[in-house]
């Protein structure tokens, strides 16, 4: 699958894409106007993007399946579990080292092609390079956090984050709903009207509120609302305290 993606990127790089930047600017302006409009405009914009969504599914489908399989194997072999034994610590450090060596250059190339000095010709090829090397950086993030969580400060942070992780699907869907109301024509229509600092600050503030709410809910319940619904569907019945 990686070889197929790289061949696709090489083919795109060989094609003349003159005027791509102007076309992208025009489409971005149209999309911004649609998301700032009423609910009908937002729905119409999403319906018009079905070809992009289909292309995204075709592009990302193989990577998603590979990621699930890699996680399945890692779980069965217990690659990231266990206590703070020397073998586990050394394994996590090796993953961090190799992940940085592979993922960091890929991330730099992806940034250079999508928002950096390279032209439209290199946007898709460099995006593909970044997509293929991104799992290496994900391994760095995960293993780095696991190493930090073995320290006293890290353990305290993990305890604060754990309730939100226990109801991650609920929090994810709530984030999607709230941010849609904030940025699209369904609500405040702030799409493209606020800077990056405001977006980042608002996201951190909202996530802090989610941490507090998650902690309160997990004191009284074992599952979040959506997790309970999902468990009910998968078990075809009300989940028991152990299910």
Image (cartoon, rainbow, N blue to C red):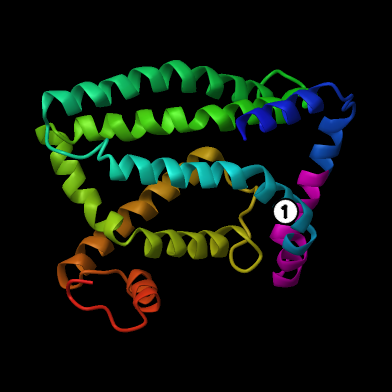
Compared with residue 66, is residue 36 higher up or lower down, i.e. above or below? Answer: below
Residue that carries the numbered disc 1 in the rendered image: 54
- Which residue does the image show at 76% across and 60% down from the upper left? 45
Q: In the figure, residue 217 lies in which quadrant? A: bottom left
Q: Where in the figure is residue 96, as x and y percent of width and height?
A: 33, 23
In the image, 26: left or right of 239?
right
Tell me if I can see residue 115 in this picture. no
In the rendered image, residue 36 lying in the magenta stretch gets the answer yes
Furthest toward the bottom, the residue is 237
Q: Nearer the viewer, residue 232 or 35?
A: 232
- Which residue does the image show at 29% across and 54% down from the upper left? 165
Main secondary structure type of the part rendered in magenta: helix
Q: Where in the figure is residue 210, as x and y percent of width and height?
A: 32, 59
- Which residue does the image show at 21% across and 21% down from the upper left? 90
Q: Where in the figure is residue 8, as x and y percent of width and height?
A: 75, 31
Q: Nearer the viewer, residue 81 or 69?
A: 69
Q: In the figure, residue 154 lies in which quadrant? A: top left
* Dot 1 alpha-carbon crowd within 10 angstroms: few under 14, some 14 to 19, many 20 or more: few
In the image, 181: left or right of 238?
right
In the image, 155: left or right of 48?
left
Q: In the figure, residue 62 lies in which quadrant? A: top right
| Magenta residue span | 27-45
Q: Where in the figure is residue 185, as x and y percent of width and height?
A: 66, 65
* Element at label 1: helix
Compared with residue 242, is residue 121 higher up or lower down, i.e. above or below? Answer: above
- Which residue does the image show at 38% across and 65% down from the upper left? 170
């Amino acid at each position: 699958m990686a070889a197929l993606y790289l061949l696709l990127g090489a083919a795109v790089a060989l094609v003349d894409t003159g005027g791509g930047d102007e076309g992208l600017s025009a489409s971005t302006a149209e999309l911004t106007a649609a998301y700032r409009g009423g609910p009908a405009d937002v729905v119409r914009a999403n319906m018009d993007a079905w070809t992009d969504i289909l292309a995204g599914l075709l592009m990302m489908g193989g990577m998603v399946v590979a990621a699930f399989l890699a996680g399945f194997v890692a779980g069965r072999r217990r690659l990231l579990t266990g206590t703070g034994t020397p073998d586990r610590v050394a394994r996590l450090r090796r993953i961090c080292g190799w992940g940085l060596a592979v993922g960091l250059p890929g991330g730099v190339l992806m940034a250079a092609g999508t928002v950096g000095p390279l032209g439209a010709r290199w946007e898709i090829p460099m995006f593909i390079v970044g997509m293929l090397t991104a799992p290496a950086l994900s391994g760095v993030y995960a293993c780095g956090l696991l190493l930090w969580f073995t320290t006293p400060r890290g353990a305290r942070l993990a305890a604060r984050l754990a309730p939100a992780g226990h109801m991650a699907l609920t929090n994810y869907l709530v984030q999607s709903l709230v941010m849609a109301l904030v940025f699209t024509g369904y609500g405040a229509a702030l799409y493209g009207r606020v800077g990056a600092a405001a977006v980042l600050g608002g996201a951190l503030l909202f996530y802090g509120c989610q941490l507090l709410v998650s902690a309160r809910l997990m004191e009284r319940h074992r599952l979040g609302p959506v997790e309970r619904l999902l468990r009910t569907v998968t078990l075809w019945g009300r989940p028991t305290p152990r299910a």
